[in-house]
Amino acid sequence: MDIEEHSQIVQLVAVREIVELARTPVVTPIILDLPRWTSINSNIPNPKLGTTDLAIVRNILQYFLDVAINNSLQNSSAARKLAEALNIIDSIGPSTKLDQITVASRQAFEPEQIPLQQLQWIHVKGAINSSQQLQEACQHLVQVTKINVPIFNIWDSISVIYTLCAESVTTSLQAELHLFQFRCIVEILSKHRYLGRDTAVPSTVAATWSDPGEADGNPLLIAFATTCAASKQDKPQIASARYDFAKTVVAALKVVKQRISILANFPPGNCAEYLSIVIVCRQVGYYISLCQRTSGDVIYKMCDYCQELRDVLAQMDINILDAWKTSFLGEGDAVEQVPAFGFSFRKLMTYASIREHFGYVTGV
């Protein structure tokens, strides 16, 4: 990497010893409660549009809006989009034809960005040589964190609120279980025709978190995200915004779109991990990332786009472990796929298996 060309990143790494990014405590946390969410998911019949289906969608959106409000995020873009989506649902009457309401409207689709400083707060630790040094470091960090996180619809909104409001997570097992829960919630919503089909719903979810070995028992930094989800004409716009967001942090990033492999069907930035990695991995150290499919019990290996992001960050001593082979929730052998034909994967435990293996964990 050209040090002079990417001096902003180098400066960020240089202040590692005196500045740490962490989240403020939440008043109403999203707790691990797998019996609740898996029960809702398992009791959904074949997805058919109806009052019951809309009630389930409404209840989940309301839950996340309430969590946002209770944690002083009522003025955030994420909360506003959920409120808009709820207003659409509440406006539906007996004579309303749903095909008159576009999927974009149902999902509150609107390109927007939120300041990254809403996702991370500055805390100072370690030895400070002078007040001027502290002031300069913090000023620089504030400048760096003016980068904006793209948020487009209810899927991004739920991801942001879960990221901000998850309970304290201190182990990788807890992080994976929360990802499984997040996946379950997204899967519930995705089963309803009201929110669309195919590209309009996320195909994967991901979480990235700081290595517990470096946390000294402190809460981990963790972020959740979904695959880009929108109509075929709008989806590339979301992916492009994520790619641009990544480039503002990692100036050396250069994605060459694959023309032969399966990646030819997906634009750079589409992946859930592409967003969660950039949000969390903002200083030198070790991190863990994991991607789960929303339909079908599968853990995916990091795709080539995310692998390139990982390789560039590694040049800055930001090291990311792709946990697809080592996941606590993985079963059986890894299945390596030729890139032209699919993504490498490993089987993801069902909830029944998770209860059998990890029933001692609170919330399982």
Image (cartoon, rainbow, N blue to C red):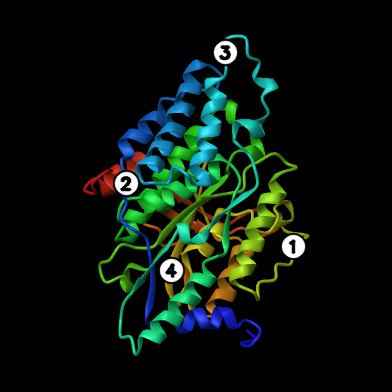
Name the image quarter holding residue 337. bottom right
Q: Residue under label 3, please give it.
A: 93
Cα distance in 3D space between marks 2 and 1: 39 Å
**What kind of residue is marked 2?**
Pro
| 60 versus 257 height, above or below | above
Say which of marks 3 and 4 sits in front. 3
Q: SS class of the residue under badge 1?
A: loop
Binning the other alpha carbons within 10 Å of mark 2 as few (below 14), some (14 to 19) or many (20 upward) gives: some
**What kind of residue is marked 4?**
Tyr
Cα distance in 3D space between marks 1 and 3: 45 Å
Of 219 and 84, the residue lying toward us: 84
Marks 3,4: beta carbons within 8 A: no
Q: SS class of the residue under badge 2?
A: loop
**What kind of residue is marked 3?**
Gly
Name of the residue lying farthest toward the right: 259
Q: Residue under label 4, please give it.
A: 287
Say which of marks 2 and 1 sits in front. 2
Of 224 and 58, the residue lying toward us: 58
Percent of width and height locating residue 151:
58, 49
| 159 versus 220 height, above or below | above
Q: Residue under label 2, please give it.
A: 29
Say which of marks 4 and 2 sits in front. 2
Which numbered circle lies on residue 257?
Answer: 1
